[in-house]
Amino acid sequence: MKEIRERTRDLKRKEHRHKPPTGKDARSIFYTPLMPVFQMKWTLLAPLPAFTSRHMALIINGLPTTIRERCDALCRYNIPEYAKTTQTVHDFLLSRCIRPIPWALPWTYFDEIQKNLYIEMGVRWAMRRLLHRFRLRRLKGPDHEIDPITFAPIVTPILVHDMKLRRKFLFDAKPLVKHIHTCLYTQEQMVPCAKAPFNIITNRPFTYAQLLSITNQVIHARVPSGPLLPYRGYQFELNTWKTYRASHLLIEAIKEETFNHVSVVGREMLIEFFLSRLHELRIVTLPEFELFLLDGLEWFPGHPSAQILRRLCIQYYEAKILKINVQPILLHAIRTFFLKDIMNGDLWKQVQRRRLEG
């Protein structure tokens, strides 16, 4: 008797372990078939005459909401010819609750259900578009036609809708693209710290729908899109953008800081780069030479010699980040630049003249 009780207890545990879930989990198509159609609320938008029969409309009424779950549910149900009433269809679906029948006969109602499903989805899509247009008409329009970024008249309008604030915002295409480029390529002392593009009026980040609308309007207006197309390739995800564009963002940060004539960090980086390369070439320099470089980059930032030094510095860091060996070519270019443009160039004479005058 004791063994019989233990076996009965084990059987009950197994039944309880494999018991189908209830509640929210019971909605999964892997455990339950269609819910009892005669107990569900009527959620169809298409009228009954649009469907081939009433029980087809009831079947579509009980399908899951998402398209993927609907396709999975339809692939699991093989409905034979004799299932012509609502109760018969429901009983037949309950008998195939978990697994599809691999040996089922080829006659099914799958094509008919799919045809009726397309009817219902078409009506739902039309109603969704109508509701979207109704919502857009209720939004408060822009107060003026002046670009909030540049405070100039708008040449190429870009319309942005904010459903939370129930307002429309009008921007000019080129300043808006430049603003988004600035946000995505923000850096602090050559350290990339990209920010999500935000609405300059509300100071809130643009949503996915707003960024997608801005991208489509910019492309339609034939304005250079800048980083919008690559950003759309990453689904407008800022973390993904930072991860997969890290090298590019670092190179752009170095370029921006190097070509910034006011930046002290950029000038110090140029001098450190140039002196370290001269040390590799075994060219001995005096401390006054470093002061000469500081004064030359500060007083004459747009001089051709300063521009050549910036280009060489950027090429060096690009090759270092991308792991490309250009050391012999770069050292030859620096030696030529030092002997031709620094020692015998016009920059040296201008700095000496400025020192004598000041």
Image (tube, helix red, strand yellow):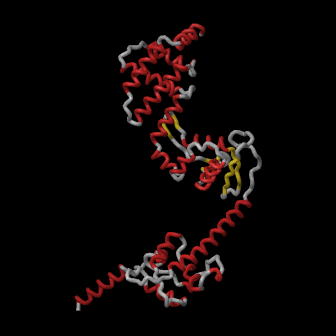
Image position of 165 (left or right of 341):
right
Q: Residue at x 64, y 80 (%)?
A: 50
Which one is nearer the viewer's eye here, 328 or 213?
328
Position of residue 248 relative to residue 235, above or below, is above
Image position of 67 (left or right of 203):
left
Count of numbered tags = 0
Residue 115 location, quadrant: bottom right
Q: Residue at x 43, y 86 (%)?
A: 95
Q: Residue at x 36, y 79 (%)?
A: 18
Position of residue 294 relative to residue 255, above or below, is above
Position of residue 273 relative to residue 124, above or below, is above
Residue 303 location, quadrant: top right
Which one is nearer the viewer's eye here, 14 or 115?
115
The quarter of the picture where the C terminus appears is top right
Position of residue 62 relative to residue 139, above or below, is below
Which one is nearer the viewer's eye here, 117 or 307?
117
Which residue ends up furthest to the front in the rendered image?
Answer: 106
- The picture places residue 198, in percent across and down from the top left corner, at 61, 47
- The picture places residue 316, in percent across and down from the top left corner, at 43, 29
The quarter of the picture where the N terminus appears is bottom left
Which residue ends up furthest to the bottom in the rendered image?
Answer: 1
Q: Residue at x 56, y 12 (%)?
A: 350
Residue 131 location, quadrant: bottom right
Which residue ends up furthest to the right in the rendered image?
Answer: 144
- The picture places residue 172, in percent across and down from the top left corner, at 69, 44
